[in-house]
Image (spheres, rainbow, N blue to C red):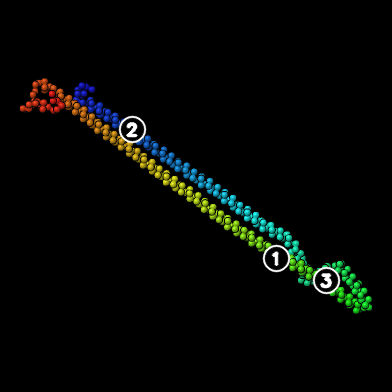
């Protein structure tokens, strides 16, 4: 710079302008870097918020699934225990019924046989069956035949001793033999009827056992059904509660994520606004300082020129203008001499 430019302040003003431009450049670069940093940080923060949210959702889902699995295993075990216990109780009833049957069935079978034989004797099953009954059980019985022969001989001896002979004796022997057969047959039929009646009683007793067992088993199955139904109802309620809990937790997570993203957006906007505000303030301050410095440099040049002019006039003996007793008052304060 020339001495003339320095004297009139133009070089100072140029330096100030260059410094102002450099300051504006630095401020702009700082602004751009700050905005770029905020722009890069916001997506990263959003990604981390979303990743955390997704992880939490997965953890909640896994927790609900695990809890449901444990719950279902517990209820399935309870169902199995109920079934096992009721099956054992049912088996006990059935076992006692089977033991009663093994005791009573032979007597029932004997009653059935006696009833069939009694029917044969009465001709209920046909004449051939009736004849077979009498041939087998009355006429063809060797014990009965021996007893009949013995009785006939004893009667013959009595008749001979009484002098009864001929047709009268034969008629009496026939009547005695027929009476013996009839009495023996009636006694046999009475025994058959007794056995048949007992068989019927045992059958009725067993039928009562079967009815009671059926009612007991039906009662067991009803209670089992009630317990299983209650169990499943409780299971459904518990599972619904778990789903409701999971839904509530996910809703809270979604609300939290939305709030966090909103806060992030608002915070980012605030930071961007702060950067812009600081930039604008700094630029305004820089402009004010630049203007002030430029004005000061310009005034300094004018003052230098006036001081130079005052020095020249003083050297020439100039006493001022008009009738002013103080020639210094004719000059600006910056060039007045003492």
Q: Position of residue 38 (x, y in %)?
A: 37, 37
194, above or below 30, in the image: below
Task: Name the residue beneath numbered marker 3.
Answer: 184
The N terminus, quarter of image: top left
The secondary structure type at the circle numbered 1 is helix
Can you tell which of label 2 and label 1 is closer to the viewer? 1
Label 2 vs 1, first from the N-terminus: 2
Q: Position of residue 10 (x, y in %)?
A: 21, 26
Q: Position of residue 315 (x, y in %)?
A: 11, 20
193, above or below 17, in the image: below
Q: Residue at x 53, y 47 (%)?
A: 67
Left or right, residue 51 beside residue 76: left
The one nearer the camera, 37 or 68, is 68
Label 3 vs 2, first from the N-terminus: 2
Query: Could you say which disc has been placed on residue 204 in the image?
Result: 1
Task: Name the residue beneath numbered marker 2.
Answer: 30
Q: Residue at x 49, y 45 (%)?
A: 60
């Amino acid at each position: 710079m020339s001495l003339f430019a320095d004297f009139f302040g133009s070089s100072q003003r140029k330096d100030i302008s260059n410094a102002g431009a450099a300051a504006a450049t630095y401020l702009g670069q700082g602004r751009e870097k700050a905005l770029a940093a905020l722009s890069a940080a916001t997506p990263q923060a959003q990604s981390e918020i979303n990743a955390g949210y997704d992880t939490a959702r997965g953890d909640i889902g896994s927790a609900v699934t695990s809890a449901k699995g444990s719950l279902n295993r517990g209820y399935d075990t309870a169902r199995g225990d109920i079934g096992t216990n009721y099956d054992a109780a049912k088996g006990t009833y059935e076992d006692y019924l089977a033991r009663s049957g093994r005791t009573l069935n032979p007597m029932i079978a004997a009653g059935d046989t006696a009833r069939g034989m009694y029917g044969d004797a009465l001709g209920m099953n046909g004449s051939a069956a009736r004849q077979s009954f009498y041939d087998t059980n009355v006429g063809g019985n060797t014990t009965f035949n021996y007893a009949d022969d013995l009785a006939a001989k004893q009667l013959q001896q009595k008749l001979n001793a009484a002098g009864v002979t001929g047709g009268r004796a034969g008629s009496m022997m026939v009547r005695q033999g027929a009476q013996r057969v009839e009495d023996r047959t009636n006694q046999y039929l009475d025994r058959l009827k007794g056995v048949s009646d007992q068989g019927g009683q045992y059958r009725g007793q067993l039928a009562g056992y079967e009815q009671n067992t059926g009612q007991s088993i039906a009662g067991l199955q009803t209670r089992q059904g009630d317990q299983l139904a209650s169990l499943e109802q409780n299971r459904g309620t518990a599972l619904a509660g778990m789903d409701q809990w999971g839904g509530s937790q996910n809703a809270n997570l979604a609300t939290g994520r939305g709030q966090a993203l909103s806060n992030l957006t608002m915070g980012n906007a605030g930071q961007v606004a702060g950067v812009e505000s600081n930039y604008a303030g700094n630029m305004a301050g820089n402009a004010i300082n630049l203007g002030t410095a430029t004005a000061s440099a310009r005034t300094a040049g004018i003052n230098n020129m006036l001081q130079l002019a005052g020095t020249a006039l003083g050297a020439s003996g100039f006493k001022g203008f008009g009738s002013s007793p103080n020639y210094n008052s004719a000059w600006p304060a910056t060039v007045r001499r003492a």
